[in-house]
Image (cartoon, rainbow, N blue to C red):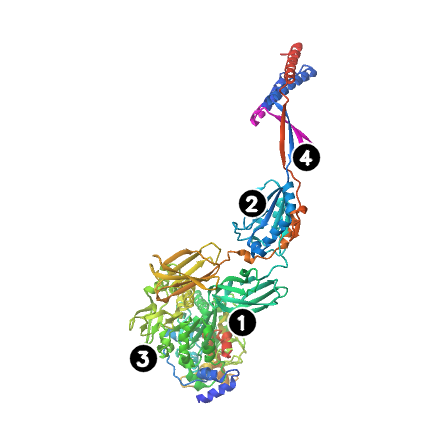
Amino acid sequence: MSGGVTNPEVLVDEWQIAATGGLGHVALILLAAAVVAGLIWTWRSLDPERPARLRATIMLLRAGALTLAVGLVLQPTLRIRRMKPLPSLLAILVDVSDSMTRNEDASRLTEVKQLLKTASRDIEKLERDHRVSWFVFGDHIREVHNHLEITTSDHPAHGTDIHGALTALSQMFPSDRLSSIVLISDGADTALTPAPKSGYDMEWVSALSTPINTVSITRAGRQHDLSITLARADPFAFSRSDTPIDVKVRSIGFEQDEVEVTLWQEGAVMQRKAVSLIGGEGSTTFTILPPRLGRQVLTVSTEIPQGDEIPGNNTAHLAFEVLRDKFRILHLAGRPSWDQRFLRDTLRAWPQIDLVSFYILRTPYQSSTLGSAGLALIPFPTTNLFENHLDEFDVVIFQDFDPAGVGVDRYLPQIASFVERGGAFVLLGGTDGFGSGLLSREPISDVLPLKLLPANTPSSRMIDSGSFLPRITEAGERHPLMQLTKDPSANQNLWKSVAHLDGIVRAAGAVDEAVVLAQHPHLRADNGPAPLLAVRDVGKGRTLAITTDSTWRWRFTGPMGGGSAEVYPNLWRRIIAWLTHDPELDRLRVNVSPATVDPGDPANIEIELLDETYRPMSGAKLEMAISWLDDSGVTQQDVIPVRLDEEGRFRREWEPRLEGPHKVRVTAPNDLRANDRFLVKPARVELQHLDPDLSFMEAIATASGGFHTVDTLDLPDIGIKDTIEQEILSREDFPIWDHPIPLVLLLSMLFGEWLLRRRVGLR
Amino acid sequence: MTHRCRQTEVSRLEGLTRRSFICGAGALFAGTMIPSNAFALGASSQIDLVQIVYGGGNWQPRPTALRRLAWEVHKRTAVDITLDPSHSKASANLLASSPFAYLSGDRPFTPWEPPLQDGLSRFLRLGGTLVIDPAFTPDGDSKGFDKSVDELISGVIPHSSAVPILPGHLIFRTFYDLSRAVGRKEGSVGLVGHEMGGRAAIIRTNHDMGGAWAKDNLGNWEFEVIPGGERQRENAFRLGVNIVMYALCTDYKDEEPHRRFGQGA
């Protein structure tokens, strides 16, 4: 039981009846049970034949006695408390993140300090009337003693998290104790990006149940900043496909109506564009053809005009992966044949291949003697192909193709150069290619995996027409090109089950730099078994030769007899992947993860090296160079010696020292090179989120029932919730039980019941 | 002569530079006298036009036809072809040697056993081409042959429906430009096909092409062409050459980059 009387001088008297007997809940329950049991026992002991009035009187006396006995045990006390309401609890949060502190003397924080200085009297009054706590925040919150301590010196903030700061505040002051919050910030929240287009979700603000008064700091009209506000490419781009890079720039405080934007890669200019500014904003799109596969890190920058307060946001980086869109293959066949037909079918069935074919349908002799009436043939575009378009192809295939027949012999040096620069060249049997003699001459012979026999070699020496089952060499068993299935023993069995081949064109042998993957089971070349399938790395490119024209039997004859129809297409997929340097099949691989490294985090670098026969090069010593540009634009490099473990691998973490693009280049013996790129995010993510966000600040105020002002601090007008906290000044207890009357009443009732029972003859 | 041919081609091919023509077109299309170095490596190197042997009926109504077509293909094209085509039963093992098969007849034949049908079905699925050419003989029953063929096809590729192969189709321009199909008889303008994997795996004629191709050992044509004229016989050969080219090159002529580069783009 309680009640109270409010004193006009904000003192409150509050009374209540309290039990001071010190009984616990269990004792109280037992006591109540005993009272009820006593009453029931009394009622049942009375003879029902007796008058009802008598029984009721006895029950009343017994109930009264038990009640008084319980009251004595509970020891009831009248408690009077005098209380005083406490001043409201206010929290003032000041944003000290990078966006608020950039440009020191002209910073937004300086503006805040000036506002606080101007409002010093209001602050004094506020602190007199209320309990005021001061906080600073960026990516985390910290309490300070007063507004004079607002500084960033020991509080580096790498972001702005307004939601986090307010949530932390609500945890510091639970149970609605806060009466008001004043939030002073530019609203440039880095935890909120990208800003929602359809309004902010403010449910969390309502849940705080405290008015939040927001003060937006903009320094409007006094800022000078040219910045790149967006530099974006799709996370995945495709080689040889136009890749757009969207760039947005904004100029605040400068009068220029055009700005030059430059796109860079590894310190070299890729493109420049003039961007018109309308209302201080402009955008452009660079379109590039990605220069290489793999991860790309590009930089976009503008000039830094004199007086630019934030030069750091005039540069932005972006990272994306370049995937191979399509393999472009030039397939030249010296005659229509089943070997040509089934290779064509296989290549055409693979959507990733862009096939350009030219087949010689008539021999030069037929062309000269039979005329051309009624023919549906087109001329062989030798010049166009080899002078204008050769570099557009990834792979050039000569299949039983005599280059002299259509004037391609003049372009053999270009094909050799094409290989050296990274292209792939395939020579497939038949005598028209292997026997023409042209391919045995320099410089094309310098890139082939086989040394061919001279043109005047008798056919009996050049050709063996016998049927044979190829023998996979030791190198072939490990080479990725020959791995048709992942299970090595299943792979071996698959190769043993293929159809026999018909005939082989003999070469003088494999060159020293080549790796023979399959050979004739018993025929010999000059320097060993007659090679059937040989590969070679040449410069940046690769070459491959197959010395038979009957591998089509693996696609038709073998499967007709119940063999696997997948051997042939799988082999060609592996061939194309290897020829085009599919990273999965590279001998030297370097991989950096993640592609975009957070500031302070390490980059994880993994290296793997296999030898020419695809065995792990355990213990090999390599060199790794990590390069980046310093603040002056000078290339810095960290050279790290690498020693591979027993599995031919190397792993380590590397801690970046600066933000921006980094390149990892690994050099192995035999001049093998591999590289990867990664981007270290700017430590100051604030640089990308410098714009004041008035709408966010206003939404917080509106949702919480507070007020929103811009660049002004009206402390007298802030919304403050009614206080609910009170301070207890005094408390007095007046024991009710500690008096003779209750005891006398108890005894009287017991005596009265005893007397009544005796008079009516009850026990 | 070579020089004159080159000049002729230059006048025909608009859009080509003189230089590109001299380097490319002159070399291939107009031709040079450079002999070929080609020698077949093995049996698989050569194209064999296999004639299918079957029970009942008459599997070889024009015995010399394929040999003559093979000769013409050899004479006119760069294809390395067996001049004495083989014949084979339609079992999987026997058809495995060549992806080109020729089925002819002039009367009904005994329905094929399931293993033979399976062999032919696998042949077609793996990329083989079957040419069906009825022979119209005086004592034959070509309609009966067609009915037997219909039953065979419905057993080999049950859910396939016949599609017309009309002038303009690749088969009419793989080597020669042809305006219609002809054989010993003029027949219909086009052919009929059954497609598998985007190509005509079965090509049916109703022109008795074998009758137009057949030539005896003394060099005489065995049958007159109807309505007549050597132009018709020549076109029958041209269609035969085109069909062989189609089996070997499939959609090569429709390859867009091929045409683009060929036009000097």
Q: Tag 3: residue type?
A: Thr
- Host chain of mark 4: A
Given residues B87 and A723, the one toward you in this image is: A723
Q: Are the residues tagged 4 and 1 within 8 Å (C-beta)? A: no
Q: Tag 2: residue type?
A: Glu
The residue to which callout 2 is attached is A143
Q: Are the residues tagged 3 and 4 within 8 Å (C-beta)? A: no
The residue to which callout 3 is attached is A457
Mark before the other along the chain sequence, 2 or 4? 4
CA gap, disc 2 and disc 4: 31 Å
Task: Tell me where the magenta segment starts and ends, as one range.
Answer: A1-30
Q: Nearer the viewer, mark 2 or mark 1?
A: 2
Vertical arrangement, residue A36 with respect to residue A110, above or below: above
Q: Quadrant of residue A532?
A: bottom left
Query: Is residue A655 located in the magenta-colored stretch of the structure?
Result: no
Classify mark 2: residues with Cα within 10 Å, few (<14), some (14-19) or many (20+).
some
Figure quadrant of the N terminus of chain B: bottom left
CA gap, disc 2 and disc 3: 93 Å
The residue to which callout 4 is attached is A10
Q: Is residue A234 visible?
A: no
Q: Nearer the viewer, mark 2 or mark 3?
A: 2
Left or right of A617: which side holds B57?
right
Mark before the other along the chain sequence, 2 or 3? 2
Vertical arrangement, residue A89 with respect to residue B219, above or below: above
Q: Tag 4: residue type?
A: Val
Q: Is residue A529 visible?
A: yes
Where does the image place residue A752, in percent across and percent down from the top left?
A: 66, 13
The residue to which callout 1 is attached is B163
